[in-house]
Amino acid sequence: MTRYIAVIALTFMAALPLRAAEVATFTLDNGMDVVVLEDHRAPVVVHMVWYRVGAADEPPGKSGISHFLEHLMFKGTEALGPGEFSDVVAANGGTDNAFTSFDYTAYFQRVAADRLDLMMEMEADRMVNLRLTEEDVLTERDVILEERNQRTENEPGALFGEMRNAAQYKNHPYGIPIIGWRHEMEQLSQDDAEAFYADHYAPNNAILIVAGDVEPDEVRALAERYYGVIPANPDIEPRMRPQEPPQLAERRITYEDPRVAQPYVVRTYLAPERDPGDQREAAALQLLAEILGGSGQTSVLPRKLQFETQSAVYASAFYSGTSLDDTTFGVVIVPSQGVELAAAEAALDQAVAEFLEEGVDAQQLERIKTQIRASLIYEQDNIQSLARTYGMALTSGLTVEDVQAWPDILKSITEEEILAAARRVFDRKTAVTGWLTGPGTEEVMQ
């Protein structure tokens, strides 16, 4: 009975149109792009400023400066003292935070709709009026170093991920961790932070996204009042990053750490990202990741490796196409007790080869498309998630039209396109294969 109800629900969901917030876009005279996602179901607004700069845009030797500056942006201006920005947001019943990735740095507040004016005033102020002291910089540098200790140095899997990325990207800055290399983080200075701020924080390098209970005309008037008066930085140019030379041979790494209790194998392949006006290959890879490892025993890798051969306790695939430059497609296997890493890797290869031979299960593909469509519909109910979707896309080179077209592109991808994309991406010459091992595993690997 439960299964029957689930089928009815999925069928009903598939028939629903994607409900999108009303979207309005415009550009201020100083070059700042603005996106308004109008949704009047609750008297709440999310105000986000996204900068087209991230860890992959840092000067050589200054890794981590994007994330460091994100922290320092809360240290205050002439109008607001250190920490006062967040205090004001909280006093007005809201929440705020910020985050840094390879391709962007973003700041946001979620507040009652009638507080939007105040949020814009404060965010525009720190776009140009950040004031730092040496004490601020030294204190916050200790904070980010401790963050690296907790999230990376104390996590073998995180260290392993850093090494895999560094092996995958020999020339492109995606091979450098977002938080930075420790020896470079330790040298970051006030001059470094202020120079990076002056070079990249300007309205013509930013996207304002306002989502929730607002009218586009209201947002335009406020944006012109607070952001429109800030001069553009004429020195900002389109991002030009070092690109990867052709990878001609598979790269392999092994990392042994006494803290590892469960060894595993990960392989990543260079893969295309979503490109403006050309998203079909990325959509095929997104569906491929779901087919291979999306959920439970219905996905190819878990079914073959966890249930049929019982060679793994976990197996999956992953892909994220929202990036400015080439990304990766990955597969992972955590072997069952007594299964050596070499045998686990061989089983993973065999499962992928069988999939390429057998092809895509049409019913599974339709089920996955329906599930994705449902998740995209539910995303409309979370204005913060929706705003984040647009921000990630726009700072990664996509357009509003690309974001809106994505669901229909996913729906239209054929089994043949998925198989063709799989055959192109599964090229061992562009792969990095990594073994994470614990004590006593090395002898097995030789």
Image: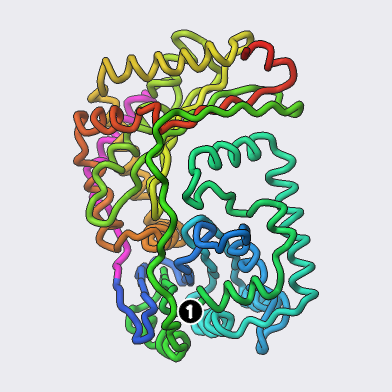
Residue 70 on the magenta span: no
Specify the quadrant that holds the C terminus. top right
Q: Is residue 157 above or below residue 91?
A: above
Q: Residue at x 37, y 75 (%)?
A: 34
- Counting from the top left corner in percent of width and height, residue 337 is at 63, 11
Position of residue 420 in the picture relative to residue 93 (left or right): left
Q: Is residue 72 above or below residue 378?
A: below
- Counting from the top left corner in percent of width and height, residue 72 is at 67, 71
Q: Is residue 327 above or below residue 233?
A: above
Q: Which residue is mark 1?
A: 202
Position of residue 318 in the picture relative to residue 357 (left or right): right
Q: Which residues are magenta?
A: 1-23
Most foreground residue, 117 or 312? 312
Residue 7 on the magenta span: yes
What residue type is disc 1 on?
A: Ala
Q: Residue at x 49, y 65 (%)?
A: 53
